[in-house]
Structures are given as structure tokens and as C-alpha cells.
Image: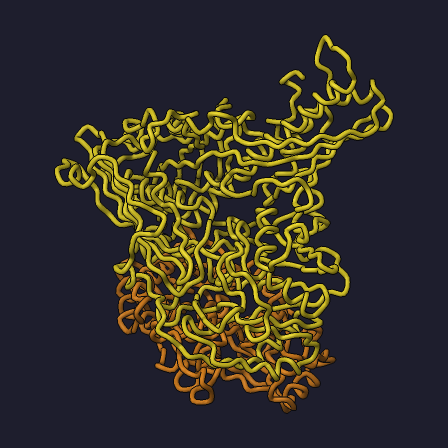
Amino acid sequence: MRPFRFTNAKDASSAVQGLTSNPNARFLAGGTNLLDLMKEDVERPDELIDITRLPLTQIKAITSGPNQGGLSIGGLGRNADAANHPLVRQNYPLLTQAILAGASGQIRNMATNGGNLLQRTRCPYFYEVSMPCNKREPDGQSARSGCGALEGINRMHAIFGWSDKCVAVYPSDMAIALAALEATVRVRKADGQERSIAFADFHRLPGDTPEKDTNLNHGELITAIELPKNRFADHSYYLKVRDRSSYAFALVSVAAALEVKENRIVQARIAMGGVAHKPWRALKAEQLLVGKEATEANFRQAAEAEMADARPLAHNKFKVELGNRSIVRALQMAFNGGKA
Amino acid sequence: MNDNNKVTGTPVSRIDGILKVTGKADYSTDHPVKNVAYGILFKSTIAAGTIKDIDTADAEKAPGVLAVITHKNAPKLNVRGGLRGGAMLQSPAVDFFGQHIGIIVAESFEQARHASRLIKVTYDEAPAKVDFDKLANDAVRPKDKEDEKRGDAKAALSTAEYKIEEVYATPIEHHHPLEPHATIAEWNGDKLTLYNSSQIVNGAQQATAATLNIKPENVRIVSPYIGGGFGSKGGQWANLVLTAVAARMVNRPVKLALTRQQMVNSVGLRQRNLQKVSLAATKDGKLTALAHEITTHSAIKDEFVEPCGDCSKLMYDTPNSLITYRVVPMNLILPTYTRGPGKSTGSFALESAMDELAYKLKMDPIEFRIKNEPERDPSNGKPWSSRATVQCLREGAKAFGWEKRKPEPRQQREGDYLIGYGVACGTYPVHQRPSSALVKLKREGSNVTATIELAAADLGTGTYTILAQTAADALDLPIGNVTVRIGDSTLPPAAGSVGSVGAISYANVVNDACIKITDELIARSGKQYFARPTASQVMIAERIDTFQARADSKAPEGADEYSSHSFNANFAEVRVNASTGMVRVSRFLAVTGAGNILNPKTARSQIIGGNVWGIGMALTEESVVDPRWGNFVTRSLGDYHVPANLDIGNMEVIFVRENDTISNKMGVKGIGEVGIVGVAAAVANAVFNATGKRVRELPITPDKLL
């Protein structure tokens, strides 16, 4: 990899300052994605600021503010710890399931919660530097700009929200659950102040600037992920369809959460993975379900309404039918309390 | 010795196991070589054309860089010296995407890799042949493969009452051993030592010497342990000799390991095959014709064609048979031997078609196979040395609970899961190859120890252990008194650990050497014995401190008058999620007739390894080429899906008892290859039984079952 400077951040303030002062610096947390990308010359930072020693690992109940009664998960806590924390298992089993559906035990032990949100796409054209990619080489800036996948091998790629600049999908499982749970991302800014980003606004669709995965500004540090209190714990399910049973990215995944009263749906949340450049909230399906009875027919109607807007590519037409089935199946499983 | 005390045939744990699990076994680049520099290959980014220029100036100035080697400054090599795949920096021609076009040597691996990114290459690009499905129509008969005809299969098919004519497609696969190909090259004057994982130790030595135009005795291959090879470390590739070239040019030892991403276009692959299988049968299930027509691809400058029709030649009795191969050159790396070469892929086509025809005939697929069991090898009329197919099917059916299978698909369901059973057979030939071995005995007081030496290879499957067992029995010594030294070309020459010849060839020569050393010790004592003494008894009685003997063995006289093969029957139970199409093999049973099983524990592991790869072949593994540019888009183990633990259910292995000493004295038949043969078809047949969907294009990913 390219030579780089390495520093240990002593505290959050110096970490943020260090990054702000160098546009080509990156934070290093678990390193499970960044280091791979550096080895392949996809990411080319000249400075890494190690933030793993910052005390941002706690998981605790939120006692004030808009998310009071919810749970705060430290940005530098490890994925495995978040998945297995008793309060997460008890109140947000959807998040536990989603985290455990991703990567491998070893990777989850290293990867951090904030870093998980910042995973980059696994599009093979992004990963191989000799291939065209607007995400790696912003449009018009290099001979390697372009999108290799648009007319290339795109079985794994997007069916919603893509642009002709980029058809990549976002890889995280954890984030799909966080989207359904309407989490908030807490961020420390360059000036030392904090701000909150609603989960739906955190990741971006590619548009003309696929090089930007998120709305996080350079120098901002994810300090925590906040989960609002909800009534989904008894009726939620994360379904992941993939090419092998473990350690594979989703063809399609669905995070489904229902609040049910006497068989009637009070509130529904559905987010999909493997279909777009960001966690895809199935808002159409959600709206159709509210007030309806929890029946397979209603689930199917909602799924079909959502998937009707899909724009598949040459090799991923199957994702439309798979999306349909997966939404229905995830809703059934959620309704049944996670049991088949 | 009494048979009951024999250590062969017992489940001895690997004698090298502790070394491996404690990290003390030295694989290629683990060898402690001083003053080593690090090399990395860099590769073409076009699939066809010519390098116009390579600008290496920035790379040469990068920190730590010792040398940049390209076709401009590489020494002349003999590209026909026996290494596979070309790409030896001898010309500016580019024949495939990711062809080696240079090496950078630096003080550290990361410095070398960094410098490799500073190289600027310009090309004259030529149109590339990289879209197989478009090129398949241009395929022609390979140079060395005549059409094989018996009777008139086409005529029999045209009048048949019951028939199947289908095309079965298999994707490109990669070997992807856990240990990537890696070499340390060290020159000492004219003498070259190569620490390099080699399935054929002497082959690597000969090919390196011929390529470098030096004497074979000046090349030493050291390969005590191999972290998997599956055929890709049988023939050696350019990376081996280029490491030696680099070491010479920087006048230091050089270590060069391929990255996982580089593996896809450096060390061969299993090619994509389109196999048309046509079967005809009478109403009562007697086969009347079998045609197996294979279309595949090879490299631009070399031809390698997997023998996909081999199983079809001999598995079933039919009066009319046709086997043809057609191949088209492509701008992809040369295909090569890959576990169960030809048989694993060929059996997927044949055994799927057998299942399809059985279903059409409304016959049980086991009974259909047994009905067509040949008495002799149909391809050459030779008698079988032994053939366990029927026994494997019968015993397997009983052990698996085959009677619970519903003949019609979609009849077994548990909640969201459709359950299905499938069966398929397999075979792999048995050969003993010429090998030599040295036995050295040493006496200290009344304790005699033995060292066995031969240039054999252990792929990780247990060669050390079975040879220690063999020698312990033949010398009547405790196994702990036997040391095995292999994987070094300075030892007596031996066959490779390829094509299932390893255990057969090595065990026989070691046994022969142990008998010979005993004979020679008895002769040296000059005494007559009432009962034959053991070697150690003579050593002790005659106070002989050290003694050695060498045997040179080959297949017994008359072995080739018989058709000798291992045979198996594979049983799969799959659970298919009716909503998502995800398939899980919940139970798998392989019943194998592979002669004398030297070590049931390592043999079981090896069969399971083959089965797991077969399940991967059926469900998950696929290397995908971009049909515009010829690059692989599946370059990591995150994209190329070998089965994970969760994909594999309950694995059972049964060995059928056989005593077949026709092909070799020890009665060993080999298990490395046969373990994968028939597996993918058993899974695909089970998927059909579960879902009613016949998938003829592997792998069976969820999208194919929606």
C-alpha cells in the first residue's frame, strides 16, 4: 500500500482536529474495510488517525432528549458487543439479527458500529483499480471514471435509486435494521459541537456524485448511534437472502418491524438491503400496511406496490421477484414473532 | 505380523497434526531464509494485444525498490520447459487479462506493492475473445482428442422410445487453496533452492531446470507441506521461475507470494463446459444410447481440455456410445487439472441426465443405474479389477433411508422448506506410478528406528501418516519409531500427489522398500530362519548399527489388462426455502469403494473435503468473467463463494470393503479425486426432487429457484 502517516488520537477533539487539517486523512477504527481497500489501492489516504482508544464504546439507556427511553450505542463499540448486549437483544432484536447476519465472527469482533455505517460498496468494479468506477475516480476526473457495472456484470447491483453514474449497492446489514428502527447518528463536528443526522438522511443515493456515500462531512466523527424507543420488539425480523448461508453479501435483505394490535397493524417499518446505494426504506409498502389486518394478502399487496417501482439491470431482474417474496416472508416472520 | 496388530487400516491421527495446529509446520514462505527481498507480480489490464511501453521510472525510484523486471530486461527463458500458462516476461504480447507483465522486488512486500502501482503501461489493444457463450459455436475438435464412437448413438437416439437430450453447463471454477502459490528462491552459485508448494516435487524440479536452461541437479525443490492445491500446484506456473529470475537479478533470496486477487489469473482454472448429454432407453429402462458432447475453451497459445466424457465411457452398459470434444481458444489463462478433472464436471452432466431419464421412465434412479451396470468396461472390454457401484448404491440406500424418498417432486415439506433426496454415482481411475523410496534403519541398543525418504508430496491429506503406518507394519516397528521425510527433490524421485496416484504409488514403494531392507538384512546375516525375522530383529541380533535399502517400484505386471477404478455413490438431502430459493444440504452420504483404506480417519476427511467442494460446485462456486474485457469480477473469497460451515450439514462417509490387488500389491485405489465425483449431481437431483425444478446450469443459486 501507499506510505502513510499513522497517529493515535488521544481524545475526540484531537482526532477531529487531526482529520480536519488533512483532507487526505482517514480515521482508522476496526480497519476491516479500510485496510483491504488500501491494500488494493482503492483508498489512498496519506494519514491514518487511530481512534480505537477513544472512550466511545458504551451502550447505555438514553435518559433525556428526543430519544429518551431509547438506547445509545457507542460509535467505536464493536459490532459483536452491540449484537449481544442484553438491552439490544431484548428491545431491538432486529438489530441483533441484522448484525449477526453480516460478515463473520472474526470480522464482527473487530468492526465498529460507526465503521459499519461507513462500509464502502463491494462492487467489483470499485475494487479493481484498472476498471472504470465513478465512485473511486469521480466522474470526469480520470481515464478510469465511468461505471463498469452499468453495462457489465451487475447481478449483485441496485434495482432502486441508481443513476447512470453508479449502480452499486450499499453492503451493510446492520444499517438496514437501523434504517427500519429510524436510528439517529450522533456526530462530533470539527468545531467540537455535536449534531444529529436522521438515519434516512445519513446515506445518499448516487446521483451525479457517487463518490459521496454519506452526508458525513470530512472531519466529522460518529460518536454514537441512538435508537428511539419503540414497540417492535415482539414483531420484528431480519431476512437475508444470499448465495451461501454465511459470509456473503445480501442478494436482497429485508428488515421488517411491526406494531400489532389485535391482528391489526398499527405501525410498519420495512427497510431493504442489497437493492440500492443506501438502505432502502419501503415507504410505499409501510403506508399500505398501516391499519390493515396482518394477512398474507395484505403483505403481498404491500410488497408488490413497493417492488413495482424497481428498475432492474441486465443481470438482476430476479431481485424484483425475490424482493417481493422477501418482504412477504419477512413480514410473516415478524408477525409471528420471528418463528416460521 | 498378525493382521490384528496392524496399524494400517486404523484411524491414526495425523503425525504432523501438532506441528500444523501450533504453526510449526513450515509452508513455502515460512522457511527461515536470511536476507530475503520481497517480490510482487504486476499484471496486464487488457486481455489481448501488445505492450507498447512500460514506464518503470517512478517505480524504480520508490522507497525500498531493488529491481523492476519486465520483458525488456528479463533473461531469455525456455517457455516450453514444462511450466504451464506462459506469462514469463519473454515478449510484449498479452494473451489474457491479468497476465504477468513484470515483477518488482523491494525490501518489503508493501514497498513492492506500492511501487507496482507507479508503473505506467501503454498497450496496442487487439480484439479479445472473452465471451465464451458467443464463441462456443466456433469450437473445433482438440488436437489430441478423436471422437469416440461405439455403435451408432445418433441412430439409436432417433428411434428411441424414451430419451433425454439436454445441455448441462458448469461455470469457471478456481482452485483457491488456502495457501496461495508462494515461493522463496535462493541461489548459491549455480545451485538454486526453491521453497515452493509442489504437488509434483520432481516435476517442479525438471520444469524449472528446463525453463532456466540449467541442470536438474542444480535445482532443489523444498515442499514439506502444502496448504492445499487441488491440481493448481501440480504443474507449476510462471511465478515459480520468475521468483528464481528475480533472485538472480537482485543477487539475494526473493520471496514471492501471489495475493488472493492474483490467483484468478496466475495458476489456471477449471474451464466452463457446455455438455450435451443424450440418453436413450427402452421402456423397461435398458440404455440403448449415450452421447456426451462437450464444448469448452482453452488458452490462445496452449490447449488443455478436461476429460468430461470419461465417466460416460464406462459407467453404464450401452451398445451405442458417442463422446466428442470441441474447444475454442480464448483470451483467458490456461485451464488446468482441477479436483476430479473432467469427472466431477462430466458426472454432473451424465448423472443429472440419468436422473432425468429415470424420472421419465418412472423408475427409481438407483434401480435404473443397477439395471445398466456393465459387466466389463464398455470402453475397452477389459474386466474390472473391482467395481463397487452396485454395493455402494445398495448400502448407501439403506444407510441413508432412501425408502423415505418420494418419487414425485415437492412431496416432502416442513414449514417453509421443501425437502428432497438425490443420488448420483462417480468414478476415478486407479494407477500406480513409478516411484522410489529409501528406508534407513538405525539401531541404538535394542531400539531400532526407521526413516523413510522419498520426494513425495503431502497436500495436507495425510501422506506422512499413511507412510509411517505402512512402514511401521512392514518393519514391525511402533509407528513412533518411524520418521517420514518427503517433499524434497534431493530424496529418491516419486510420483506426484495428483490424479489419486499419491497414496497408491507411495505406499507400495515404501512397503517394497521395507520388504527389501528386511530381505537384505536376512541375507547379510547369512543365517537360515525357521520363521522370517523382522528387520529390527536382525539388526539387534547381528548388532548392525545402520542399514539402508532403496526400492524402485512400478505397477505390477498385467495391471493394464484390467480396468481399475474407484467407484462411489453419493446421497444428498436438501432443504430448499420455498420463499427465498436458498438451498441447504442437510445430509450428505458418500459410499466409496476405494480398495484398501490405509487410514480411515484421514480418508474420511479427504472424502468429506471432496464432498464439500462438490456441494460448493453445486450451489455456490462460480468465477465470473466480464464479457467485454476478460477480467474476473470474482477475485476474493468474499465474491467466490466456497461453502461456509453453515452451508454444510451432516456428513457421513462409508467405505465399502474391497480387496483388489490387481492394480497394485497394497490394494490401494486412491480417494483424492473420487470424493468430488458425482457430488454436484446428487445435490442437483435432490433439488429437483424437492422443488420440481431441474437446474442444468451450476451453481444453483437462489435466483434459479424462484
Q: In the displayed structure, does residue B379 sit left or right of residue B454?
A: left
Residue B157 placed where, x, y %?
A: 17, 39
Looking at the image, the residue that sits furthest to the top is B530
> Toward the viewer: B75 or A46?
B75
> Toward the viewer: B534 or B406?
B534
> Residue at 39% across / 49% down in the picture?
B306
Q: In the displayed structure, does residue A11 sit left or right of residue A150?
A: right
Looking at the image, the residue that sits furthest to the right is B445
Q: Using the rendered image of the protein, determine whether residue B86 is visible from the camera's viewpoint.
A: yes
Residue B153 placed where, x, y %?
A: 21, 39
Image color mode: by chain
> Toward the viewer: A340 or A125?
A125
Q: Quadrant of residue A242?
A: bottom left
> Toward the viewer: A165 or A197?
A165
Quadrant occupied by the C terminus of chain B? bottom left
**Chain B: drawing colour:** yellow
> Residue at 53% across / 59% down in the picture?
A100
Eyeballing the image, is B505 above or below B50? Answer: above
**Chain A: drawing colour:** orange
Looking at the image, the residue that sits furthest to the left is B159
Residue B195 placed where, x, y %?
A: 67, 54
Q: How many marks?
A: 0
Residue B18 placed where, x, y %?
A: 71, 43
Q: Using the rendered image of the protein, determine whether residue A256 is visible from the camera's viewpoint.
A: no
Q: Quadrant of residue B213?
A: bottom right
> Residue at 40% across / 86% down in the picture?
A208
Q: In the displayed structure, does residue A180 sit left or right of residue B70?
A: left
Quadrant occupied by the N terminus of chain B? top right
